[in-house]
Amino acid sequence: MAEKGQLSREFAEEQSSLWRIAFAPTVWAVHFVACYATAAVACAKFPEAELAHVGVWRVAISAGTLVALALIAWIGWRAWRHWDYLDDHDYSHGRDDNESRHEFLGHAGFLLAVVSFIGVLATWLPAFLIEGCT
């Protein structure tokens, strides 16, 4: 009976890890849609003005970028702790046991957070660098 309770706890922990893996790319996707929607609204409302003169839109996009980067950094930090690499310096997860599965999910979550962080920066750059809508 005790084994069944332990299995359900391990399953619940791994299930929450799966959600953490998907959260960083989701933040990136929401940021992508929000940035391009904001730029589309700015260009529709002010078609002849340069975006540099419409500082409110750039500030809004930059603020959203900072929030997204903070969320992804927090997710990455939690995944790094979940990976527990510094404890045993084990980056290989080939064994079929709970510890390897647990560390693999942390490793995958950390790498997805890194890719998502870079993706958010790449999405933000056009709003920062492009001067106008045309």
Image (cartoon, helix red, strand yellow):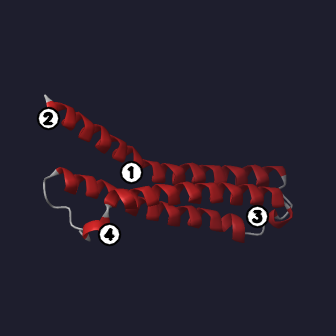
In three-dimensional space, the C-alpha distance between marks 1 and 4, rounded to whole angstroms, equals 20 Å
Q: Nearer the viewer, mark 3 or mark 1?
A: 1
Which of the numbered marks, if any, corresponds to residue 3? 2
Q: Which residue is denoted by mark 4 in the rendering? A: 86
Residue drawn at point x = 64 percent, y = 50 percent: 34
Disc 3 from disc 4: Cα separation: 50 Å
Give the camera-side residue of 119 and 99: 99
Mark 3 or 1 closer to N-term?
1
Secondary structure type for disc 1? helix
- Residue underneath mark 1: 21
Residue at 63% across, 55% down: 67
Binning the other alpha carbons within 10 Å of mark 1 as few (below 14), some (14 to 19) or many (20 upward) gives many
Is 5 on the left-hand or right-hand side of 34?
A: left
Judging by the rendered image, the residue that carries numbered circle 3 is: 134
| Callout in the foreground (1, 4) | 4
Looking at marks 2 and 3 on the same chain, the residue that comes earlier in the sequence is marked by 2
Residue 52's place in the image compared with 42, above or below, is below
- Judged from the image, the secondary structure of the residue bearing numbered disc 3 is loop
User: Disc 3 and disc 1: Cα gap in Å?
Assistant: 38 Å
